[in-house]
Amino acid sequence: MTSWHSFDPATGHGLKHDPMKAIVAPRPIAWVGSVSDEGVHNLAPYSFFNLISAKPPLLMISSEGNKDSITNIASTGEFTVNLVTQANMAQMNHSSASVAATVDEFELASVDWLSSEVIQARRVAKTPVSMECKLIEIKPLTDVDGKALNTAMIIAQIVRVHMHTDYIKDGLFDLVAAQVIARAGYRGDYVPVDRTTEMLRPKD
């Protein structure tokens, strides 16, 4: 007989650690570059992140708490999203430290950077893909009862994409060769993209 551990997230899971971020996983990581009105550059990872439209390409990130990245994005209306790989994951982790808004995380985590082409926010130099984005909406979130949460969803349009040519093979972006990683929940669990499987949709 199948056994289930069932719970209402509002009242508690009864486990050693909250399983929600491990259940909804792996999640791609947006390494977000932004800049303040005062010209201070910021770099921070977000795993509540995904593409939400292809034409035009729209993406979302979600932030719990009013972090420096969100303040910058709300003010300037722009940011970059950079992919995280096995080679730069330690720097990504370093850039997640809670530091003052006056601290430049590119400098803090020793991250090489490049200027963007159509926005002011920097992009990560040693990444297989970086994307320049312009803000569409910052949407405050509520729970099912309409109670305001300390969480906001940022929706933006990708206006420029930079793909490293080493990872374009036969016209396709090679995730495995790029060694992209994803967030797998709990305190510091990550998984590498080490294989892909093609499964074509059935014909109508």
Image: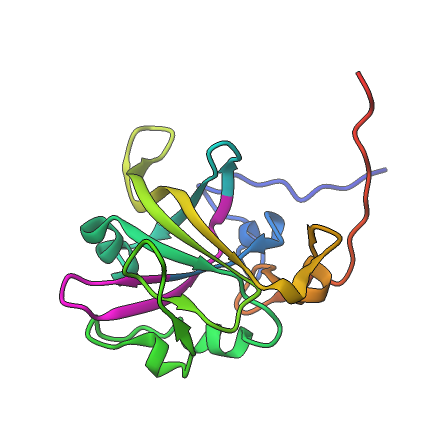
Q: Is residue 175 left or right of residue 151?
A: right
How was this image coloured?
Answer: rainbow
Q: Residue at horizontal 57%, vertical 62%?
A: 16
Q: Is residue 147 left or right of residue 56?
A: left
The vertical placement of 163 against 86, above or below, is above
**Considering depth in this image, is 162 or 74 the residue closer to the camera?**
162
**Considering depth in this image, is 116 or 103 the residue closer to the camera?**
116
**Residue 5 falls in image quadrant:** top right
Q: Which secondary structure dominates the residues rendered in magenta? A: strand
State yes or no: residue 204 in magenta: no
Residue 47: % across, % down: 49, 56
Residue 93: % across, % down: 47, 74
Q: Residue at horizontal 25%, vertical 48%?
A: 77
Query: In what quadrant of the picture does the N terminus appear?
Result: top right
Query: In what quadrant of the picture does the C terminus appear?
Result: top right
Q: Is residue 4 left or right of residue 107?
A: right
Residue 27: % across, % down: 57, 53
Q: Residue furthest left?
A: 38
**Residue 175 falls in image quadrant:** bottom right
Q: Residue furthest top?
A: 204
Q: Is residue 160 left or right of residue 18?
A: left
Residue 99: % across, % down: 27, 75
The vertical placement of 65 against 203, above or below, is below
Q: Residue at horizontal 30%, vertical 43%?
A: 135
- Residue range (magenta): 33-50
**Considering depth in this image, is 101 or 170 the residue closer to the camera?**
170
